[in-house]
Image (spheres, helix red, strand yellow):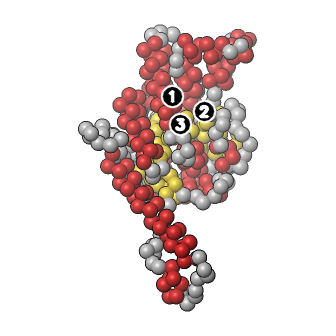
Amino acid sequence: MDPRQFLRASRVVIVAGKGGVGKTTVAAALARMAARQGLSTLVVQVERASGLARLFGRPPLTYVESTLAPAAGTIAEVRGRTITPDDALLEYLEDHGLRRISRRLVSTGAMDVVSTAAPGIKDILILGKVKALERSEAADLIVVDAPAAGHAITFLLSVRGLLDAVRVGPINAQARDVLELLSDPARCSVVLVTLPEETPVNEAVETAFTLEDRVGVSLGPVVVNGLYPLLPGLDIDPVEAAEAAGTSLRPGEAEALAEAAAFRRDRQALQQAQLERLDERLPIPRLGLPFVFSAELGPSHVDLLAAALLDGVVGLADGPTESPVRAPAEGSPS
């Protein structure tokens, strides 16, 4: 598939997944991949604790847009910002001439009272701002680093909940506008991130069914992060391999190498089994990203993953980037 066609399929891509699967890293890699295709990209984080800026070697993001990666030649700029409910509310009220009230509303904690009385109001404020950015064409592509999978579902479901709870007024209008964004595949899609492990795969499958059935959002390819590259020769005896290479091993090295090979074989078998299970239960295109053996990820790692993501996209069959999911078979494992 042509990468630009893939990246232009939806103007907003929401990246979601279970905590710890590398969701934020995938969002960064997707943004960098888009920039390398000449598309200006805005990455939005909705949790202040996100390590997004650190991946680009930049200071923490704020509500004000800042540059994560500058433009260079044919590579476009990647910008980033944080959107919190309080900041979004302040901007909304100030835009409507209520600046004095807005500061008091947040400083007194009244926002928490409002959110308790109308569940989902905080999420709709964030999604409403994302919708405004999309409408204003703030960037060629907007990547949203969503909350972890459990919250991501309520984050996106909040729109329908508010429509049921608030029948008229500006909140209802905002919720309807956001729902139009979420349900239009040309404007918005969700990319789920998982690891090749049982629990993350289960959660990715369940999240996919919930999002399509209850939110109506289109799903892009699922990204399987942290894949170990397949290594040949793991069944060869270390002593025999050393002799064939014209060398010898020191005491204990053969045992250590054999244990390492056994671990890698087990890991590869587990990985393959989970990939097959994911393909069976979630019939949408799949992209894979390699495991990065580094304690601290930075810009060079993001570029490496962006290149791997590009290779995967090029290998996708031409056609729609999203595919409908089907409900799990009766009695099938979750």
* Badge nearest the viewer, 3 or 1: 3
Residue lying at 56% horizontally and 72% vertically, measured from the top left: 256
**Mark 2 lies on residue:** 46
Q: Position of residue 138 (x, y in %)?
A: 60, 35
The foreground one among 44 and 197 is 197
* Badge nearest the viewer, 2 or 3: 3
Image quadrant occupied by the N terminus: bottom left
Q: Position of residue 88 (x, y in %)?
A: 63, 23
Res. 145 mark: none
**Mark 1 lies on residue:** 155
Whether residue 127 sits left or right of residue 76 in the image: it is left
Residue lying at 54% horizontally and 77% vertically, measured from the top left: 254
Number of numbered discs on residues: 3
Amino acid identity at mark 2: Val
Whether residue 257 sits left or right of residue 49 in the image: it is left
The foreground one among 318 and 105 is 105
Q: Earlier in the sequence, mark 2 or mark 1?
A: 2
Amino acid identity at mark 3: Ala
- SS label for mark 1: helix
Q: Is residue 59 above or below residue 253?
A: above
- SS label for mark 2: loop
Classify 10 Å Cα crowding around label 3: few (below 14), some (14-19), many (20 and above).
some
Res. 148 mark: 3
Image quadrant occupied by the C terminus: top left
Residues at circles 2 and 1 in contact by the CB criterion of under 8 Å: yes
Determine if residue 116 is in view.
yes
Residue lying at 43% horizontally and 21% vertically, measured from the top left: 160
Q: Earlier in the sequence, mark 2 or mark 3?
A: 2
Q: Earlier in the sequence, mark 3 or mark 1?
A: 3
Q: Position of residue 179 (x, y in %)?
A: 45, 25
Q: CA distance from mark 3 to mark 1?
A: 10 Å
